[in-house]
Image: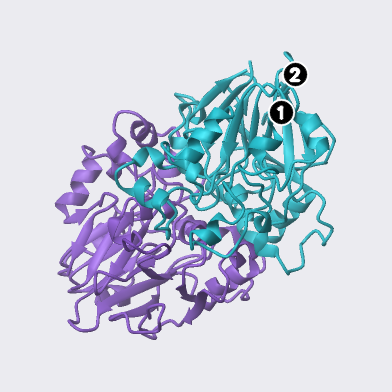
Chain colours: A purple, B cyan
């Protein structure tokens, strides 16, 4: 059985974001704490005992505390069911949580060499000694089986593939530690259980849906997809910033080239948005946008949502 | 009036720590959620409207959400009462929270040039653009007045001073970006309200109490002090690790050279431990160690504790 737990569904900053007074963040701080959402990450397991995180959000410590599946085994002084972390990009909201995985438990970081180069060039990540925390490069279009800390098989097969996106924005205009060829900055993942062949897709960042991507996703039982913004200019329209969704490398939910429209009719079993920005009105349960998304078969998952395939 | 809010009181890793099955962490995950404690940081204000954080813990986002004083002003789309962050060292548990202060609100980071050099040499911190987030070096034994984002006076006066300690351990055995002269790695702070002269001390890391330090702290109305371990070898004795308190640059609470004994008889008005490790039995409310600490006049503050001077 392939098990997934949604640790967080929000985009960078989370809900509420420390400095944000938008309707969603304000409501989440006061009358509707159930609107609170931590930053996007999921945990996946083939055996229910060993788990792999997809991305390490800045909220990782709270996410682990809130998720019984990720608690240390009873009776062990130091232990974690987390066998590894698979990174799909180098943004702060995907990597900062690694800094909360100190204290010597063994696990493996799987990432494209461009992201590993970022970790290597930032000495703060040396807090995870290479002795306990192995770094394993992953390659676009090459499936791999993540391993458990003792080297044994996890029962999972992960296929990373390139998706339209952008590099980490704190490196914009600067020399990338792995050079300025952008390939590998934004990955999608196909994650399968080897024994049963069950699988799902994870794309927390994606700038547009190409025909190739449509073919890939068609018929999938489950897809997690980039839900950052409802419409491309919503941050500007709301007075929250000067960036468009596209400028940040993210597709919109709505519109003729948006995610809802682009992924319609592909016979996908279950569709969940992830990496949803606090500016996105679809976060509000009674909003027309939320209803449109739900009518189109999309779910906006609460932190802790469990799915079994 | 000088106002202080304890945002978190735990040492690095917090309570519960992601991979820890010690009695404190296990209890905090299950029957006693009130044992949960986020990583050490306080907020201080002279006017109740503008606040300065002392250190930026990895739990910063949750700490801000839990602290009404730090919420954006009602009616403002983007705002934060946090005017600045004063760093006393470069450990992960003191700086990682800066990565949760993205999104363009202006504030100032005050730190010794050794810590600023760490931030500068780690590109992830470039996520805080120098345009919005000023870096201001602070100097041992030179008092400064932190300013508000518009340049006006905060009404606070902060005196940094050197205390016995250690450099950030992820840089151990490596070239420090500011060179290998250790002065300035661990600071204590005297924080005063200029108008009233009211003041307190903050020492979240301190390896030992020297006679100079005793003279400094004598008669202070309030002291926050390093409470990492109860006894020097407790991590080893509990099977949780191979480090001593001293090896990490931290004094013990107990013992003839410990904090309780060393700071006794100094006529300090109120004494609170901060940076308390999950291995420390004084965290357990009914433990003999807790009772000894309390009988000696020490408090182990819960997250959110407010103090006014």
Q: Nearer the viewer, residue A254 or B181?
A: B181
Residue A216: x %, y % from top left = 27, 77
Q: Is residue A228 visible?
A: no
The quadrant in which the N terminus of chain A is found is bottom left
Q: Nearer the viewer, residue A59 or B33?
A: B33
Same chain letter for marks 2 and 1: yes
Which marked residue is nearer to the observer: mark 2 or mark 1?
1
Residue A107: x %, y % from top left = 45, 72
Q: Nearer the viewer, residue A34 or B295?
A: B295
Q: Residue at the location (69% across, 53% down)?
A: B249
Residue A95 placement, left or right of B120: left
Badge 1: few (under 14), some or many (20 or more) residues near its Cα, within 10 Å?
A: many
Please name the residue that numbered disc 1 is placed on.
B191
Q: Could you tell me which chain the residue with mark 2 belongs to?
A: B
Q: Nearer the viewer, residue B259 or A21?
A: B259
Residue B35: x %, y % from top left = 40, 41
Please name the residue that numbered disc 2 is placed on.
B194
């Amino acid at each position: 059985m392939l098990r997934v737990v949604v640790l967080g569904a929000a985009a960078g900053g989370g809900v509420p974001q420390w400095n944000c007074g938008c309707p969603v963040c304000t409501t989440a701080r006061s009358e509707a704490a159930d609107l609170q959402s931590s930053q996007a990450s999921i945990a996946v397991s083939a055996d229910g005992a060993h788990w792999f995180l997809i991305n390490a959000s800045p909220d990782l410590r709270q996410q682990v505390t809130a998720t019984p599946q990720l608690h240390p085994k009873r009776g062990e002084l130091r232990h974690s069911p987390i066998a590894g972390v698979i990174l799909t990009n180098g943004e702060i909201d995907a990597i900062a949580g690694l800094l909360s995985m100190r204290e010597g438990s063994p696990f493996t970081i799987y990432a494209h060499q461009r992201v590993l180069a970022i970790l290597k060039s930032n000495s703060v990540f040396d807090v995870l000694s290479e002795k306990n925390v192995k770094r394993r490069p992953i390659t676009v279009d090459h499936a791999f089986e993540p391993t458990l800390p003792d080297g044994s098989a996890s029962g999972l097969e992960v296929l990373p593939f390139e998706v339209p996106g952008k590099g980490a924005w704190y490196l914009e205009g600067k020399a990338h530690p792995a050079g300025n060829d952008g390939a590998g900055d934004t990955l999608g993942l196909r994650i399968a259980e080897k024994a049963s062949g069950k699988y799902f897709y994870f794309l927390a960042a994606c700038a547009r849906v190409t025909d190739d991507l449509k073919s890939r996703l068609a018929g999938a039982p489950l897809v997690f997809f980039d839900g950052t913004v409802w419409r491309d200019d919503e941050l500007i329209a709301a007075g929250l910033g000067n960036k468009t969704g596209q400028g940040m490398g993210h597709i919109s939910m709505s519109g003729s080239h948006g995610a809802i429209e682009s992924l319609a009719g592909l016979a996908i079993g279950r569709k969940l948005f992830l990496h949803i920005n606090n500016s996105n009105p679809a976060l509000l349960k009674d909003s027309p946008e939320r209803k449109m998304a739900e009518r189109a078969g999309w779910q906006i998952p609460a932190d802790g949502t469990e799915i079994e395939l």
